[in-house]
Amino acid sequence: MTIGYSGAEKIDDLLDPAQGLVSRHVFSDPAIYEMELQRIFARCWQFLGHESQVPRPGDFVSAYLGEDPVMLVRQDDGSLAAFLNVCRHRGMRICKLDAGNAAGFSCSYHGWAYDRRGKIVDVPFGEMYENAPLDDSWAAVPVAQVASYKGLIFGTFDPDAPSLVEYLGDMAYYLDVLVDRREGGTELVGGANKWIIDSNWKYGAENFVQDGHHAFASHISALMAVQPDEAEVTDFPGGCTVSPGSGHGGGWFEGPTLEMVVRDPVLLRYHQDVVRPESIRRLGADRDPVHNVAAFTVFPNFSFLTGVQTIRVWVPRGPNHMEVRSWTIVDKAAPQEVKDAQLRLVRTTFSPSGILEQDDGENWSMCQDTMRGHVSRQLNSNMRMGMGKRVDADIAVPGRVMHGWNEEPGRGFFERYRHLMSEPTSRAWLER
Ligand code: FES
Ligand code: FE
């Protein structure tokens, strides 16, 4: 046990993912957090928004790449661009709104004006810059790459990062269960929920990458409360996990969990009679089990739940806090009553006031709180569940699949994390 960690140089000493050991310093140390902003969040692809939020030229939404505020803007030619939402004059936000439509943006501090691409088009008292012209080098800093995967828009500041499709790799196969299960694709409804949890961002990411088994202890009372009077939850459903590589991962329940969580008959009927048959036709039967309430994380901080249909970003807010930004995602082709019911489901289960979300937030913030203690901080988190077990190949889906609850995808998440944190150059993208 190391007493008194004080720097981020020896990240390798803090992580032994192959042995399922993750030092709690990586959840709490300020120096490591600073390194994450540079080596994870300034490089990896992260979720910016959904195509349905920006259908027309001039539509924009605000987002974050790590702690850097950015704007995603639909361009006049239909393409997408994103730039740092930071005025080049003194650093005020160029735009204070979360979403809208604009011909351009005017900073509210001294009035510098930017076009939809982030180029400066006007400044008050412009003649006074005669000898120090505001050329294009003073434009808003562009997000180097912006790309959409079937409606989900991601961006990265790193021009050397692999393309989005390469970055997702086999994870795209599982994303399809969310975004490509019906003809016509998806849309977001009901706007964003945003809230702060007093916990490191990795608690959310790690929970969705592998941790279906926490539901047994964390959520059983909430689940019991919504069961019919005569029902008892005696056998907690088993699970299956997958590590598609590159730190992505997820898992799904193998019992009738959808029926436990989704109590609305409108949604259950829609799922059973419309979604599953169409999805099997479009995507094949192999992915059918993934519909049965599945949680996934796209490395580093974009997560989603199929069945419930929530997507979210765990925005880092210092080592001890995260901002959750979540949305409800529905099939565009779904009838309005289904969309309304889906939104109600997310609000009552996985929102700041949701019966299941509150269990998670309490767990994560208490885990974080214990790290205030000097001795507590020296301990390793145990991610050894399922170590040494056989990786199953009996279902024809990509990635390392394991039946039975286990923490294999979390070990993959932290392997990827360690790799990126140890390699500051673009070689990190080659040596995967
Ligand atoms: Fe934006 Fe001054 S900070 S115009
Ligand atoms: Fe949970």
Image: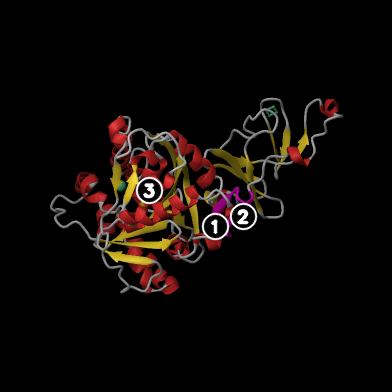
> Would you say the residues marked 1 and 2 are in contact, meaning their CB atoms lie under 8 Å apart?
yes
Q: Residue sitting at 33 percent across and 30 percent down?
A: 372
Name the spot of residue 146 as percent of width and height, x first. 61, 53
Q: Mark 2 vs ligand 1: CB under 8 Å? A: no
Residue 116 versus residue 203: which sits nearer the camera? 203
Q: Residue at x 18, y 51 (%)?
A: 228
Give whichever of 368, 187 is nearer the camera.
368
Mark 1 / mark 3, whichever is N-terminal:
3
Compare residues 170 and 189 and report the one nearer the observer. Answer: 170
Q: Is residue 150 magenta?
A: yes
Q: Is residue 95 left or right of residue 17?
A: right
The residue singled out by tag 3 in the image is 15
**Looking at the picture, which amino acid does disc 1 mark?**
Trp
Amino acid under disc 3: Leu
Q: Residues within 10 Å of mark 1 (few under 14, many from 20)?
A: some
Q: Quadrant of residue 69?
A: top right
Q: x%, y% of residue 182? A: 46, 65
Q: Which mark is residue 126?
A: none
> Is 207 one of the magenta-colored residues?
no
Q: Which residue is mark 1?
A: 429
Q: Based on the displayed image, in which of its 4 quarters is residue 389 positioned?
A: bottom left
Q: Cβ–Cβ below 8 Å for labels 3 and 2? A: no
Sooner in the amino-acid sequence: mark 1 or mark 2: 2
Q: Which mark is residue 160?
A: 2
Whereabouts is ligand 1, in terms of quadrant?
A: top right
Specify the segment rendered in magenta: 144-164
